[in-house]
Image (cartoon, helix red, strand yellow):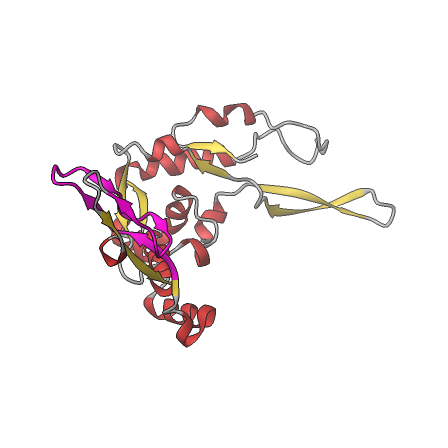
């Protein structure tokens, strides 16, 4: 992520003396300066494509495979609003096995988590029971002809292991910008993150407003996090 931080603006923070007056300043990165992708822009498949994370790939692997460099891993995370890679990115099978045993024990992982419906259609092909509804083990369905569906014909059990695996797999589906849009995205990001050049240590009023704030929503991909 070092490339991401290089785009953040510097700010000068006053160091108080013994009398609490600000006399010296140090320059640091403003890590609170953030933007996020506009949901509507991600849905535009002209600029973004759906992607399924393969195997044990991490963000830098995906970046290298798609863009030829690992340096765009932070853009991948930003596009998909991932702020915690440990909980929002799929883990490897080895990590998964450690997690599941630590969470449920060696036997607990095979215990029933819930019961889920199978998809049932009538003779016309219409769905009368959708797949994936969470129900009780004794759930039944009465058909138009009076027959009653129940048991394994209608429901199946989901273990803790299967539930956690499903959650982990669901994290594989992400969106990626097309390579030819990357320059535009980075250019826009740079513009949004920077402060107006007139903001410096000569104006330390905490109530002062950055003159660029009104321009946040004029960009194609981003909106501000305030």
Q: Residue at x 58, y 43 (%)?
A: 32
In x, y percent, where is residue 92? 34, 65
For the C terminus, the quadrant is top right
Q: Nearer the viewer, residue 106 or 189?
A: 106
Q: Nearer the viewer, residue 21 or 149?
A: 149
Residue 133 visible, this orientation: yes
**Is residue 130 rendered magenta in the image?**
yes
In x, y percent, where is residue 161? 36, 65
Quarter of the figure with residue 43 = top left
In x, y percent, where is residue 211? 58, 25
Q: Residue at x 33, y 37 (%)?
A: 183
Residue 213 relative to residue 98: left or right: right
Quarter of the figure with residue 159 = bottom left
Residue segment shown in magenta: 113-142
So how many labels did they put on this image?
0
Q: Residue furthest right?
A: 19
Quarter of the figure with residue 109 = bottom left
Residue 69 visible, this orientation: no
**Is residue 129 rendered magenta in the image?**
yes
In x, y percent, where is residue 134? 36, 50
Q: Residue furthest left?
A: 123
From the viewer's perspective, is residue 78 above or below residue 150?
above
Q: Residue furthest bottom?
A: 106
Q: Residue at x 37, y 36 (%)?
A: 185
Residue 48 relative to residue 125: left or right: right
Q: Residue furthest front?
A: 146
From the viewer's perspective, is residue 137 above or below residue 192?
below
């Amino acid at each position: 992520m070092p490339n991401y931080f290089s785009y953040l603006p510097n700010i000068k923070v006053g160091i108080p003396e013994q009398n609490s007056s600000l006399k010296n300043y140090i320059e640091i990165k403003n890590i609170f300066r953030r933007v996020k992708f506009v949901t509507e822009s991600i849905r535009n498949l002209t600029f973004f494509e759906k992607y399924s994370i393969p195997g044990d790939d991490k963000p830098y692997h995906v970046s290298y495979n798609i863009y030829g460099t690992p340096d765009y891993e932070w853009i991948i995370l930003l596009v998909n609003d991932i702020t915690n890679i440990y909980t929002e990115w799929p883990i490897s099978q080895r990590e998964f096995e450690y997690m599941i045993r630590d969470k449920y024990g060696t036997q607990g992982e095979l215990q029933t988590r819930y019961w889920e419906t199978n998809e049932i259609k009538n003779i016309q092909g219409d769905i009368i029971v959708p797949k994936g509804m969470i129900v009780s083990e004794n759930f039944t369905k009465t058909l138009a002809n009076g027959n009653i569906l129940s048991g394994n014909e209608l429901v199946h059990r989901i273990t803790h292991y299967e539930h956690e695996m499903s959650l982990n797999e669901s994290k594989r589906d992400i969106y990626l910008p097309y390579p030819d849009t990357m320059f535009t995205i980075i250019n826009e990001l740079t513009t949004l993150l920077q402060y107006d050049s007139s903001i410096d240590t000569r104006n330390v009023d905490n109530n002062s407003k950055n003159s660029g704030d009104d321009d946040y929503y004029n960009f194609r991909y981003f909106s501000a996090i305030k």
